[in-house]
Image: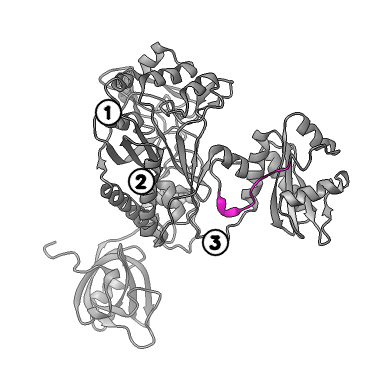
Amino acid sequence: MGEPVRSDRAGELRASDAGREVRLAGWVASRRDLGGVVFLVLRDASGEAQVVVDPQAVPAAGEVAKDLRDEYCITVSGTVRPRPDGTVNPGMATGEIEVAAADVRVLSPSDPLPFQIDDRADVDEVRRLQWRYLDLRRPRMKANLIARSRAVSAMRRSMEGQGFLEVETPTLIRSTPEGARDMLVPSRLRAGSFYALPQSPQLFKQLLMIGGVERYYQIARCYRDEDFRSDRQLEFAQLDLEGAFWGRDDVLATLESVMVEVARELRGVELSTPFPRLTYREAMARYGTDKPDVRLGMEICDLGGAFAGTGFKAFAGVLDAGGVVRGINAGPLGMGRSGLDALGDLAKGAGAKGLAWLVVEDDGSLRSPIAKFLGDDEAAAVKEAMGAGPGDTLLLVADTPEIAAPALDRVRRHLGEPDDPDELAFLWVIDFPVFEKAPDGSLAPAHHPFTSPHDVDEMGSDPEHALSHAYDLVLNGSELGSGSVRIHDPEVQRRVFEILGISDEEAESRFGWFLEALRYGTPPHAGFAVGIDRLVSILQGEPNIREVIPFPKTQTGADPLTKAPTPVAADQLAELGLEAAGEDADGVAGGDGAAGEGGGASAG
């Protein structure tokens, strides 16, 4: 085309443009034929504008307009004019004007649509992902992509304003599992060997600190072969950062500045800093989780003192065995017996033996199946400890500490409703354990094996209770990311490996290239990584991160659009020194991306 495809963007036209000749390009969002005059709504990335085609005034344009359908890609030339009295649409940014068409041309027709391109249509998610390029035209998805872009821009502004250097780290690396399974990439030039896609840039950003960069960041792509949830994907993006000569508070202050900038950009609110802080142990004791939604209230109370010497055998047996009795004041629930029993099923689903409930009557007495087993002093002590008044429902669990608090957390999250759904309750959880027990009883890193302990000697003498300089950022009950002060002393790193059962030989084999670097004047350093998808989904009020990712996978790891993952041809595998194994070894595609489940490939 010799002439420009368009002169203006549809959503930017205003009343001040009346009388101007314009050329627009976009998609037909809707078409109405009213007595021969055709009204089009033309949509482009900037918004929508009404176009009027009068066949009597412009017969050629009328001929084209009569055959237009939704999502045809067209150009329109015409004159901007005020809308007639009584037809102004305050719901449109361009609602005061319309374009009187002098010429309409089809750039590209559209097949019949698999679903309507508007937010009123309730469309199955797999169907949306199969035609994701159409789904992205919907207002909701367009708004989410814009928000994501603005969030990343705000992050970059903040990081650069704080003197950080953006550096890209490799995406083909050595496999160094960090808690999830690696995504592996076979090497053609070294048959039988594999690269891994990074679960995070962890070791490379530490090398940048050794290299004297001092302040690093990047918008990093990361890959983890893990089970799916609404807030997880095989591949994701994170704001990754690291600082030399830093401690924990330097990291927290930096991240708070970033969050202030992002919240201002997307929500137009000013966050108060510093964010509240809870230790890991405080979070577990008060909320039963290391990512509490503090907006919900209903903090967990320890009722061991109230039931000391109790005659209620169920509670006495738990306490005598070293267990706990804990509870939450759920406030006035107005539930009947069946509703309260259903809450008990929630607690049992979290591993508890049951959930006791007590309702405070108007006269202060307790209505409960266990009320007859409680003395007056116990009843009074429970009400005092839980700040209970008439109408309140008290929910109690007697079990081990490891079960009671998480069970109450599940009930609390089920019942809780924030007073202000738009509130942004940021929170730091600090001082995580260095190690956690694996299912087989061995110790595993609670964060990762390069996290600095509070006390090296304590870590050696009592590793199960040793604390680390690790910290999480939590927003409205979701973990946004994790970070830590890193180990910069090679001897401390060796002792961590020793406690984990990693011999010097194994450590050298897996991490030798990194351990060698630690011996060349490594500065103290610390860092963090924020999940961009999760942050934007919360700020946009979306239920899961797939709504803010342009082309996500389903909960099964499938891509309905490209049908990935799929088997590959035998000659491609042979070139990599591999051969297929399992049901799909013949190269036949396995339906909805299910190929490879139960199968695999072996090195030749």
Magenta residues (range): 293-303
**Quadrant of the image containing the N terminus:** bottom left
Which element carries disc 3, helix, strand or loop?
Answer: loop
Q: Nearer the viewer, mark 3 or mark 2?
A: 2
- Residue 30 position, x and y percent, is 37, 69
Q: Is residue 438 visible?
A: yes
Check the image and name the residue furthest to the left: 2
Residue 530 found in image quarter: top left
The alpha-carbon separation of the residues under discs 3 and 2 comes to 27 Å
Q: Which residue is mark 1?
A: 210
Indicate the amino acid at tag 2.
Answer: Thr
* Marks 1 & 3, CB-CB < 8 Å contact: no
Label 1 crowd (10 A; few <14 / some 14-19 / many >=20): many
Q: Which residue is mark 2?
A: 254
Colour treatment of the image: one colour
Choose the circle earlier in sequence order: 1 or 2: 1
Check the image and name the residue furthest to the bottom: 85
The structure residue drawn at horizontal position 37% and vertical position 82%, both measured from the top left corner, is 88
> Would you place residue 304 above or below residue 172 in this image?
below
Indicate the amino acid at tag 3.
Answer: Asp
Residue 420: assigned label = 3
- Residue 169 position, x and y percent, is 28, 34
